[in-house]
Amino acid sequence: MAKIKVIDNSKADLHDKYRIASSCDLKLFLSEPIDVKCPVSDNIITMSGVVPVEIKTDGYNKGEPHKDHEAQLRHQMICLDAQFGIITKLGPNLEMNMYPYERDEEWDADYLENVADFWRRVEEDDPYPDLKPNEYVADLNEMETSQELLTAIEGLQNIEAQKKKQDALIDDIKTTIKRVLRKHECDQAVVGPYVIKINTIQRKATPQKIVPAKPAGEPYERLSIKLNSGELQ
């Protein structure tokens, strides 16, 4: 059975050559090779030696960890001179999964080139140029899932169009109900099992914080309809 040892994690891991450092959530030492299977791709990575473990919580994404999380782990792998790493993610429905990674020489080279450029700019007092808007337009028509994406977009547009119609219909119905109450010179009434009431809401003034202060708004009406529990007869 493979032996797994937890490595002391009280200090940051410094890489003197590249002048970078990291602080891992957990560091393991595997004295014997073990297989870790990716729950998405079913790809198995046999790992051993020092293994940084990054722990993430993502209640919305069922798939593999985000690319920025992967980049964080790869940075840690460089700092530790580790060949392998793991992201442990608690996903939707409290489902826990482990995602294995191994060193990618091409990714490392691109990253370390940016690190070297950063320190050059520090030493030469050469600031980064101002960011320019990303005007690149990607053509997704050749993507394998382009038809699924198109179907999703068209479905979204259809739902939004239906929602607008439903919202307009809801407003019309509320206006009709209010008109009936006004005709009877009242703000509340009972009909069948329901209590109908017009609530007058006064919006309070808000202090200025990050956004400009807002003055108190004009009162507005909110119609409520609920089952009559007997408070009105």
Image (cartoon, rainbow, N blue to C red):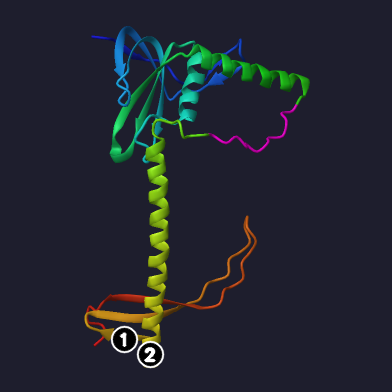
Vertical placement of 71 versus 16: above or below?
below
Separation of residues labelled 2 and 1 (CA atoms):
7 Å
Q: Residue at x 51, y 11 (%)?
A: 105
Question: Residue 28: image x %, image y %?
Answer: 38, 16
Q: Would you identify the image quadrant in which residue 227 lies?
A: bottom left
Q: Amino acid at mark 2?
A: Cys
Q: Secondary structure at mark 2?
A: loop
The part of the chain drawn in magenta is 127-138
State which quarter of the image contains the C terminus. Answer: bottom left
Residue at the far bottom in the pictured view: 184
Q: Residue at x 41, y 73 (%)?
A: 171
Question: Residue 68: image x %, image y %?
Answer: 49, 29
Vertical placement of 167 versus 56: above or below?
below
Q: Would you identify the image quadrant in which residue 50 lies?
A: top left
Label drawn at residue 186: 2
Residue 47 is a magenta residue: no
Q: Residue at x 26, y 79 (%)?
A: 194
Q: Amino acid at mark 1?
A: Ala
